[in-house]
Image: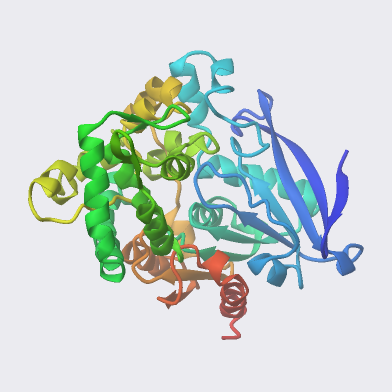
Protein backbone atom coordinates (compact mmCIF):
# COMPACT_ATOMS: atom_id res chain seq x y z
CA UNK A 1 0.00 0.00 0.00
CA UNK A 2 1.43 3.38 -1.05
CA UNK A 3 1.31 6.30 1.37
CA UNK A 4 1.06 9.87 0.06
CA UNK A 5 1.73 13.04 2.04
CA UNK A 6 2.67 16.66 1.45
CA UNK A 7 5.64 18.95 1.82
CA UNK A 8 5.77 22.58 0.68
CA UNK A 9 4.87 22.61 -3.01
CA UNK A 10 5.03 18.84 -3.55
CA UNK A 11 3.14 15.60 -3.01
CA UNK A 12 5.26 12.62 -1.99
CA UNK A 13 4.39 8.95 -2.23
CA UNK A 14 6.37 6.13 -0.63
CA UNK A 15 6.71 3.26 -3.12
CA UNK A 16 8.00 -0.25 -2.41
CA UNK A 17 8.88 -2.96 -4.91
CA UNK A 18 9.93 -6.59 -4.72
CA UNK A 19 12.72 -7.70 -7.07
CA UNK A 20 14.92 -10.78 -7.37
CA UNK A 21 18.23 -10.69 -5.54
CA UNK A 22 19.71 -12.34 -8.64
CA UNK A 23 17.87 -11.33 -11.80
CA UNK A 24 19.23 -14.43 -13.54
CA UNK A 25 17.22 -16.48 -11.01
CA UNK A 26 13.87 -14.68 -10.90
CA UNK A 27 12.29 -17.57 -9.03
CA UNK A 28 14.84 -17.31 -6.20
CA UNK A 29 15.31 -15.01 -3.23
CA UNK A 30 13.86 -11.52 -3.38
CA UNK A 31 14.75 -8.17 -1.84
CA UNK A 32 12.70 -5.01 -1.29
CA UNK A 33 13.36 -1.67 -2.94
CA UNK A 34 12.15 1.69 -1.73
CA UNK A 35 11.58 4.81 -3.83
CA UNK A 36 9.98 8.17 -3.16
CA UNK A 37 7.69 9.55 -5.85
CA UNK A 38 7.66 13.36 -6.04
CA UNK A 39 5.23 15.50 -8.02
CA UNK A 40 4.48 19.23 -7.96
CA UNK A 41 1.47 19.94 -5.77
CA UNK A 42 -0.44 21.66 -8.57
CA UNK A 43 0.26 18.76 -10.97
CA UNK A 44 -0.49 15.87 -8.63
CA UNK A 45 -3.43 14.61 -10.69
CA UNK A 46 -1.92 15.20 -14.13
CA UNK A 47 -0.51 12.57 -16.46
CA UNK A 48 3.19 13.40 -16.61
CA UNK A 49 6.29 11.69 -18.03
CA UNK A 50 8.58 10.06 -15.48
CA UNK A 51 12.13 10.98 -14.52
CA UNK A 52 14.16 8.47 -12.51
CA UNK A 53 17.01 9.91 -10.43
CA UNK A 54 20.01 7.69 -9.69
CA UNK A 55 22.12 8.91 -6.79
CA UNK A 56 25.90 9.03 -6.68
CA UNK A 57 27.90 6.62 -4.59
CA UNK A 58 27.93 3.70 -4.68
CA UNK A 59 26.19 3.08 -1.40
CA UNK A 60 24.17 6.24 -0.83
CA UNK A 61 20.40 6.39 -0.59
CA UNK A 62 18.50 8.95 -2.65
CA UNK A 63 18.32 12.56 -1.52
CA UNK A 64 16.04 13.33 1.44
CA UNK A 65 15.17 16.87 0.43
CA UNK A 66 12.34 19.10 1.61
CA UNK A 67 10.09 20.73 -0.96
CA UNK A 68 11.54 21.31 -4.41
CA UNK A 69 15.13 22.56 -4.13
CA UNK A 70 17.65 22.83 -6.96
CA UNK A 71 17.42 20.43 -9.88
CA UNK A 72 14.32 18.80 -8.43
CA UNK A 73 12.32 22.00 -8.71
CA UNK A 74 13.28 22.26 -12.38
CA UNK A 75 12.41 18.62 -13.04
CA UNK A 76 8.99 18.95 -11.40
CA UNK A 77 7.96 21.54 -13.96
CA UNK A 78 7.45 18.74 -16.46
CA UNK A 79 8.10 15.38 -14.79
CA UNK A 80 6.89 13.10 -12.06
CA UNK A 81 10.15 12.16 -10.33
CA UNK A 82 11.15 8.87 -8.74
CA UNK A 83 13.99 9.00 -6.20
CA UNK A 84 15.25 5.44 -5.92
CA UNK A 85 17.20 4.02 -2.99
CA UNK A 86 19.47 1.67 -4.92
CA UNK A 87 19.65 -1.85 -3.52
CA UNK A 88 21.50 -2.02 -0.22
CA UNK A 89 21.00 1.69 0.55
CA UNK A 90 18.44 3.72 2.47
CA UNK A 91 15.28 1.66 2.91
CA UNK A 92 16.14 -0.79 0.10
CA UNK A 93 17.17 -3.92 2.06
CA UNK A 94 20.15 -2.10 3.62
CA UNK A 95 23.54 -3.82 3.69
CA UNK A 96 25.67 -2.99 6.73
CA UNK A 97 27.46 -4.52 9.72
CA UNK A 98 24.13 -5.17 11.43
CA UNK A 99 22.31 -6.81 8.52
CA UNK A 100 25.03 -8.64 6.59
CA UNK A 101 25.53 -11.35 9.26
CA UNK A 102 22.04 -12.55 8.28
CA UNK A 103 23.71 -13.84 5.12
CA UNK A 104 26.24 -15.94 7.03
CA UNK A 105 29.99 -15.48 7.30
CA UNK A 106 32.33 -13.27 5.26
CA UNK A 107 32.32 -15.59 2.22
CA UNK A 108 28.52 -15.57 2.03
CA UNK A 109 28.45 -11.81 2.59
CA UNK A 110 30.95 -11.22 -0.22
CA UNK A 111 28.98 -13.42 -2.62
CA UNK A 112 25.81 -11.51 -1.73
CA UNK A 113 27.45 -8.14 -2.36
CA UNK A 114 28.58 -9.07 -5.87
CA UNK A 115 24.92 -8.50 -6.81
CA UNK A 116 24.95 -4.84 -5.78
CA UNK A 117 26.72 -3.34 -8.77
CA UNK A 118 25.37 -1.26 -11.67
CA UNK A 119 24.15 -4.23 -13.71
CA UNK A 120 21.84 -5.37 -10.91
CA UNK A 121 20.72 -1.79 -10.25
CA UNK A 122 19.73 -1.35 -13.90
CA UNK A 123 17.74 -4.56 -13.89
CA UNK A 124 16.03 -3.34 -10.71
CA UNK A 125 15.14 -0.14 -12.55
CA UNK A 126 13.59 -2.10 -15.38
CA UNK A 127 11.46 -4.12 -12.95
CA UNK A 128 10.36 -0.90 -11.25
CA UNK A 129 9.63 0.80 -14.57
CA UNK A 130 7.24 -1.96 -15.55
CA UNK A 131 5.18 -1.22 -12.44
CA UNK A 132 5.48 2.56 -12.42
CA UNK A 133 5.05 3.58 -16.06
CA UNK A 134 3.18 0.57 -17.36
CA UNK A 135 6.11 -0.17 -19.63
CA UNK A 136 6.58 3.30 -21.14
CA UNK A 137 10.21 4.44 -21.33
CA UNK A 138 11.33 7.11 -18.90
CA UNK A 139 14.00 9.76 -18.59
CA UNK A 140 16.87 8.93 -16.26
CA UNK A 141 19.23 11.39 -14.55
CA UNK A 142 22.39 9.92 -13.08
CA UNK A 143 24.76 11.85 -10.81
CA UNK A 144 28.32 10.53 -10.41
CA UNK A 145 28.01 6.75 -9.83
CA UNK A 146 24.42 7.22 -10.98
CA UNK A 147 25.95 8.19 -14.33
CA UNK A 148 27.93 4.95 -14.34
CA UNK A 149 24.58 3.21 -13.90
CA UNK A 150 23.10 5.20 -16.80
CA UNK A 151 25.97 4.03 -19.02
CA UNK A 152 25.20 0.45 -17.98
CA UNK A 153 21.50 1.13 -18.66
CA UNK A 154 22.34 2.22 -22.22
CA UNK A 155 24.32 -1.01 -22.56
CA UNK A 156 21.78 -3.44 -21.11
CA UNK A 157 18.30 -1.99 -21.61
CA UNK A 158 18.24 1.13 -23.80
CA UNK A 159 14.64 0.33 -24.75
CA UNK A 160 13.64 1.49 -21.27
CA UNK A 161 14.98 5.00 -21.81
CA UNK A 162 13.32 7.99 -23.46
CA UNK A 163 16.26 10.25 -22.58
CA UNK A 164 19.48 9.75 -20.59
CA UNK A 165 21.17 12.55 -18.65
CA UNK A 166 24.50 12.28 -16.83
CA UNK A 167 26.16 14.75 -14.45
CA UNK A 168 29.78 14.12 -13.51
CA UNK A 169 29.50 10.39 -14.12
CA UNK A 170 30.74 9.13 -17.50
CA UNK A 171 32.97 6.16 -16.61
CA UNK A 172 35.83 4.67 -18.53
CA UNK A 173 34.49 1.63 -20.36
CA UNK A 174 37.62 -0.46 -19.89
CA UNK A 175 39.92 1.05 -17.23
CA UNK A 176 41.01 -1.20 -14.39
CA UNK A 177 40.85 0.28 -10.90
CA UNK A 178 44.63 0.80 -11.05
CA UNK A 179 44.20 3.03 -14.12
CA UNK A 180 41.48 5.00 -12.35
CA UNK A 181 43.65 5.74 -9.30
CA UNK A 182 46.81 6.46 -11.29
CA UNK A 183 44.82 9.20 -12.96
CA UNK A 184 43.22 10.28 -9.66
CA UNK A 185 46.19 11.00 -7.40
CA UNK A 186 47.67 13.77 -9.61
CA UNK A 187 44.22 15.40 -9.77
CA UNK A 188 43.96 15.24 -5.99
CA UNK A 189 47.39 16.83 -5.65
CA UNK A 190 46.24 19.71 -7.87
CA UNK A 191 43.15 20.23 -5.71
CA UNK A 192 45.27 20.32 -2.55
CA UNK A 193 47.64 22.84 -4.13
CA UNK A 194 44.67 25.01 -5.10
CA UNK A 195 43.38 24.81 -1.53
CA UNK A 196 46.70 25.95 -0.05
CA UNK A 197 46.90 28.75 -2.63
CA UNK A 198 43.50 29.99 -1.44
CA UNK A 199 44.18 29.40 2.25
CA UNK A 200 47.98 29.46 2.73
CA UNK A 201 47.59 29.43 6.52
CA UNK A 202 46.12 25.93 6.25
CA UNK A 203 49.44 24.42 5.18
CA UNK A 204 50.94 24.89 8.65
CA UNK A 205 47.68 23.98 10.38
CA UNK A 206 47.53 20.68 8.49
CA UNK A 207 51.16 19.89 9.32
CA UNK A 208 50.52 20.60 13.01
CA UNK A 209 47.50 18.28 13.12
CA UNK A 210 49.36 15.56 11.23
CA UNK A 211 52.32 15.81 13.60
CA UNK A 212 49.98 15.46 16.59
CA UNK A 213 48.40 12.34 15.08
CA UNK A 214 51.80 10.79 14.32
CA UNK A 215 52.86 11.22 17.96
CA UNK A 216 49.57 10.54 19.79
CA UNK A 217 47.04 7.73 19.81
CA UNK A 218 43.74 9.52 19.18
CA UNK A 219 40.37 7.80 19.39
CA UNK A 220 37.33 9.88 18.47
CA UNK A 221 34.21 9.88 20.70
CA UNK A 222 32.47 7.31 18.47
CA UNK A 223 35.40 4.89 18.74
CA UNK A 224 37.01 5.79 15.40
CA UNK A 225 40.81 5.48 15.56
CA UNK A 226 41.95 8.81 14.16
CA UNK A 227 45.24 8.26 12.32
CA UNK A 228 47.13 10.61 10.06
CA UNK A 229 45.90 8.66 7.04
CA UNK A 230 42.34 9.20 8.22
CA UNK A 231 43.05 12.92 8.59
CA UNK A 232 44.43 13.06 5.05
CA UNK A 233 41.29 11.37 3.72
CA UNK A 234 39.26 14.43 4.74
CA UNK A 235 40.49 15.88 1.45
CA UNK A 236 37.60 14.09 -0.22
CA UNK A 237 35.59 17.30 0.29
CA UNK A 238 37.93 19.24 -2.03
CA UNK A 239 36.08 17.93 -5.06
CA UNK A 240 32.84 19.71 -4.14
CA UNK A 241 31.79 23.28 -4.77
CA UNK A 242 32.23 24.47 -1.18
CA UNK A 243 34.70 21.81 -0.05
CA UNK A 244 37.77 24.02 0.17
CA UNK A 245 35.91 26.43 2.47
CA UNK A 246 34.56 23.62 4.64
CA UNK A 247 38.04 22.16 5.06
CA UNK A 248 39.44 25.57 5.96
CA UNK A 249 36.83 26.14 8.66
CA UNK A 250 37.50 22.67 10.04
CA UNK A 251 41.25 23.20 10.29
CA UNK A 252 41.06 26.58 12.01
CA UNK A 253 39.29 25.10 15.06
CA UNK A 254 41.49 22.03 15.53
CA UNK A 255 43.32 22.75 18.81
CA UNK A 256 42.34 23.93 22.27
CA UNK A 257 44.58 24.74 25.23
CA UNK A 258 44.07 22.58 28.33
CA UNK A 259 45.93 22.23 31.66
CA UNK A 260 47.92 19.43 30.02
CA UNK A 261 48.78 21.54 26.96
CA UNK A 262 47.28 21.80 23.50
CA UNK A 263 45.10 18.97 22.24
CA UNK A 264 42.51 18.37 19.54
CA UNK A 265 39.30 20.13 20.53
CA UNK A 266 36.04 18.36 21.18
CA UNK A 267 34.37 20.47 18.49
CA UNK A 268 36.99 19.46 15.93
CA UNK A 269 36.71 15.78 16.85
CA UNK A 270 32.92 15.90 16.67
CA UNK A 271 33.03 17.31 13.14
CA UNK A 272 35.73 14.90 12.02
CA UNK A 273 33.95 11.77 13.19
CA UNK A 274 30.87 12.76 11.24
CA UNK A 275 32.95 13.22 8.11
CA UNK A 276 34.92 9.98 8.47
CA UNK A 277 32.31 7.51 9.65
CA UNK A 278 30.82 5.08 7.15
CA UNK A 279 27.96 4.16 9.46
CA UNK A 280 25.40 5.74 7.12
CA UNK A 281 26.89 4.35 3.89
CA UNK A 282 29.08 1.28 4.55
CA UNK A 283 28.28 -0.15 1.14
CA UNK A 284 30.36 2.66 -0.36
CA UNK A 285 33.46 1.30 1.37
CA UNK A 286 32.65 -2.34 0.68
CA UNK A 287 32.00 -2.23 -3.05
CA UNK A 288 33.65 0.99 -4.18
CA UNK A 289 36.52 -0.61 -6.08
CA UNK A 290 34.27 -3.35 -7.47
CA UNK A 291 32.52 -0.77 -9.67
CA UNK A 292 35.72 -0.86 -11.76
CA UNK A 293 35.92 -4.68 -11.86
CA UNK A 294 35.10 -6.04 -15.31
CA UNK A 295 37.43 -8.97 -15.92
CA UNK A 296 39.50 -11.65 -14.23
CA UNK A 297 41.87 -9.18 -12.56
CA UNK A 298 41.18 -8.56 -8.88
CA UNK A 299 40.95 -4.98 -7.68
CA UNK A 300 43.22 -6.05 -4.79
CA UNK A 301 42.94 -2.85 -2.76
CA UNK A 302 43.91 -0.82 -5.80
CA UNK A 303 43.91 2.64 -4.21
CA UNK A 304 46.23 1.48 -1.42
CA UNK A 305 48.68 -0.09 -3.87
CA UNK A 306 48.65 2.81 -6.30
CA UNK A 307 49.08 5.39 -3.55
CA UNK A 308 52.49 3.85 -2.85
CA UNK A 309 53.53 4.98 -6.34
CA UNK A 310 53.06 8.59 -5.20
CA UNK A 311 55.43 9.03 -2.22
CA UNK A 312 54.53 12.71 -1.90
CA UNK A 313 51.35 11.54 -0.13
CA UNK A 314 53.39 9.97 2.71
CA UNK A 315 52.68 12.20 5.71
CA UNK A 316 55.79 11.25 7.68
CA UNK A 317 58.06 12.08 4.74
CA UNK A 318 56.30 15.39 4.18
CA UNK A 319 56.70 16.38 7.83
CA UNK A 320 60.35 15.32 7.86
CA UNK A 321 61.03 17.90 5.15
CA UNK A 322 59.44 21.12 3.99
CA UNK A 323 56.82 19.63 1.69
CA UNK A 324 53.14 20.39 2.32
CA UNK A 325 50.97 17.65 3.77
CA UNK A 326 48.83 16.27 0.95
CA UNK A 327 45.24 15.29 1.55
CA UNK A 328 43.73 12.37 -0.34
CA UNK A 329 40.39 12.03 -2.09
CA UNK A 330 37.84 9.43 -3.12
CA UNK A 331 39.64 6.20 -2.29
CA UNK A 332 39.05 3.25 0.01
CA UNK A 333 41.89 1.65 1.99
CA UNK A 334 42.26 -1.44 4.22
CA UNK A 335 43.08 0.71 7.26
CA UNK A 336 39.56 2.14 7.17
CA UNK A 337 38.24 -1.27 8.20
CA UNK A 338 40.52 -1.16 11.25
CA UNK A 339 39.72 2.43 12.23
CA UNK A 340 35.97 2.72 11.68
CA UNK A 341 33.66 0.87 14.12
CA UNK A 342 31.02 0.68 11.38
CA UNK A 343 33.44 -1.23 9.12
CA UNK A 344 35.54 -3.32 11.52
CA UNK A 345 33.29 -6.41 11.47
CA UNK A 346 33.35 -6.34 7.65
CA UNK A 347 37.12 -6.39 7.02
CA UNK A 348 37.26 -10.04 5.94
CA UNK A 349 34.27 -9.53 3.66
CA UNK A 350 36.06 -6.56 2.06
CA UNK A 351 39.24 -8.62 1.61
CA UNK A 352 37.29 -11.33 -0.19
CA UNK A 353 35.68 -8.80 -2.53
CA UNK A 354 39.10 -7.29 -3.27
CA UNK A 355 40.42 -10.74 -4.21
CA UNK A 356 37.59 -11.75 -6.57
CA UNK A 357 38.52 -12.63 -10.15
CA UNK A 358 35.08 -13.25 -11.66
CA UNK A 359 33.81 -9.74 -12.34
CA UNK A 360 31.61 -9.45 -15.40
CA UNK A 361 31.53 -6.55 -17.92
CA UNK A 362 29.29 -3.62 -17.03
CA UNK A 363 29.28 -1.90 -20.43
CA UNK A 364 28.67 -3.01 -24.02
CA UNK A 365 30.81 -0.88 -26.38
CA UNK A 366 29.10 -2.24 -29.50
CA UNK A 367 25.65 -1.40 -28.22
CA UNK A 368 26.80 2.03 -27.07
CA UNK A 369 28.27 2.69 -30.51
CA UNK A 370 24.84 1.97 -32.01
CA UNK A 371 22.93 3.97 -29.39
CA UNK A 372 19.78 5.82 -30.51
CA UNK A 373 18.65 7.16 -27.10
CA UNK A 374 19.08 10.95 -26.75
CA UNK A 375 21.95 11.39 -24.28
CA UNK A 376 23.54 14.48 -22.76
CA UNK A 377 26.31 14.63 -20.18
CA UNK A 378 27.82 17.37 -18.04
CA UNK A 379 31.58 16.80 -17.76
CA UNK A 380 33.30 18.97 -15.17
CA UNK A 381 36.77 20.24 -16.02
CA UNK A 382 39.35 18.60 -13.73
CA UNK A 383 36.67 16.72 -11.78
CA UNK A 384 38.40 15.28 -8.70
CA UNK A 385 36.22 12.16 -8.57
CA UNK A 386 35.78 11.14 -12.20
CA UNK A 387 38.64 11.62 -14.63
CA UNK A 388 37.75 14.14 -17.32
CA UNK A 389 39.87 12.45 -19.99
CA UNK A 390 38.22 9.09 -19.26
CA UNK A 391 34.78 10.71 -19.49
CA UNK A 392 35.47 12.43 -22.79
CA UNK A 393 36.90 9.25 -24.31
CA UNK A 394 33.71 7.43 -23.34
CA UNK A 395 31.56 10.28 -24.66
CA UNK A 396 33.14 9.82 -28.09
CA UNK A 397 32.17 6.14 -28.12
CA UNK A 398 28.46 6.59 -27.34
CA UNK A 399 26.60 7.39 -30.53
CA UNK A 400 24.72 10.68 -30.39
CA UNK A 401 25.92 11.69 -26.91
CA UNK A 402 26.31 15.43 -26.51
CA UNK A 403 28.62 16.82 -23.84
CA UNK A 404 28.73 20.05 -21.92
CA UNK A 405 32.26 20.52 -20.60
CA UNK A 406 32.39 23.24 -17.97
CA UNK A 407 34.61 24.60 -15.20
CA UNK A 408 31.74 26.57 -13.72
CA UNK A 409 30.92 23.76 -11.29
CA UNK A 410 32.70 21.05 -9.37
CA UNK A 411 31.57 17.43 -9.24
CA UNK A 412 28.40 18.29 -7.32
CA UNK A 413 27.18 20.78 -9.93
CA UNK A 414 23.75 19.13 -9.99
CA UNK A 415 23.42 20.28 -6.36
CA UNK A 416 25.04 23.70 -6.55
CA UNK A 417 23.72 24.72 -9.97
CA UNK A 418 20.88 22.26 -10.35
CA UNK A 419 18.26 24.12 -12.41
CA UNK A 420 20.83 25.50 -14.86
CA UNK A 421 22.59 22.16 -15.20
CA UNK A 422 19.36 20.28 -15.85
CA UNK A 423 18.11 22.95 -18.27
CA UNK A 424 21.33 22.71 -20.27
CA UNK A 425 21.30 18.93 -20.43
CA UNK A 426 17.66 18.75 -21.46
CA UNK A 427 18.31 21.29 -24.20
CA UNK A 428 21.30 19.28 -25.44
CA UNK A 429 19.37 16.01 -25.39
CA UNK A 430 16.51 17.63 -27.30
CA UNK A 431 18.92 19.27 -29.75
CA UNK A 432 17.72 22.71 -28.72
CA UNK A 433 21.06 24.11 -27.53
In the image, is 165 to the left or to the right of 196?
A: right
Identify the residue at horizontal 28%, vertical 50% (top origin).
181
Quarter of the image for residue 289 reads top left
Q: How is the image coloured?
A: rainbow
Quarter of the image for residue 191 reads bottom left
Q: Look at the picture and state if 337 lies above or below 34.
A: above
Q: Look at the picture and state if 218 lies above or below 54.
A: above
Most distant residue in the front direction: 259
In the image, is 69 to the left or to the right of 348?
A: right
Identify the residue at horizontal 53%, vertical 64% (top origin).
166
Q: Look at the picture and state if 120 lies above or below 351.
A: below
Residue 126 is situated, as x and y percent measured from the top left of the image, at 67, 47
Question: Would residue 26 be seen by someone viewing this image from the given angle?
Answer: yes
Residue 402 is situated, as x and y percent measured from the top left of the image, at 49, 75
Front residue of 105 and 336? 336
User: Which quadrant is home to the C terminus?
Assistant: bottom right
Most distant residue in the bottom direction: 433
Front residue of 173 and 369? 173
| Total marks in image | 0
Front residue of 265 and 67? 265
Most distant residue in the left direction: 321
Q: Look at the picture and state if 229 lies above or below 63.
A: above
Front residue of 111 and 335? 335
Question: Would residue 357 be seen by someone viewing this image from the given angle?
Answer: no
Residue 14 is situated, as x and y percent measured from the top left of the image, at 80, 45
Most distant residue in the right direction: 45
Amino acid sequence: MSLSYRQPGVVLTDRRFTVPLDHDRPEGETIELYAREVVAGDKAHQELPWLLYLQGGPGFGADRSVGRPGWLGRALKEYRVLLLDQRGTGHSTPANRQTLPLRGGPAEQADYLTRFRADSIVRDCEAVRAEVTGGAPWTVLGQSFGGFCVTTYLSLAPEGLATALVTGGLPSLDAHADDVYRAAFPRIERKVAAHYARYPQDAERARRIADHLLTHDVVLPNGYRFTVEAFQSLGIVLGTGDGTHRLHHLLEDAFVRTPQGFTLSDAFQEQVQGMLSYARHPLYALIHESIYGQDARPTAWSAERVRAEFPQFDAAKALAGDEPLLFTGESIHPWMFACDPALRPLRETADLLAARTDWTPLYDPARLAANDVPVAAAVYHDDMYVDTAHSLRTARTIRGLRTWVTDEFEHDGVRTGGPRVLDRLLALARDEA
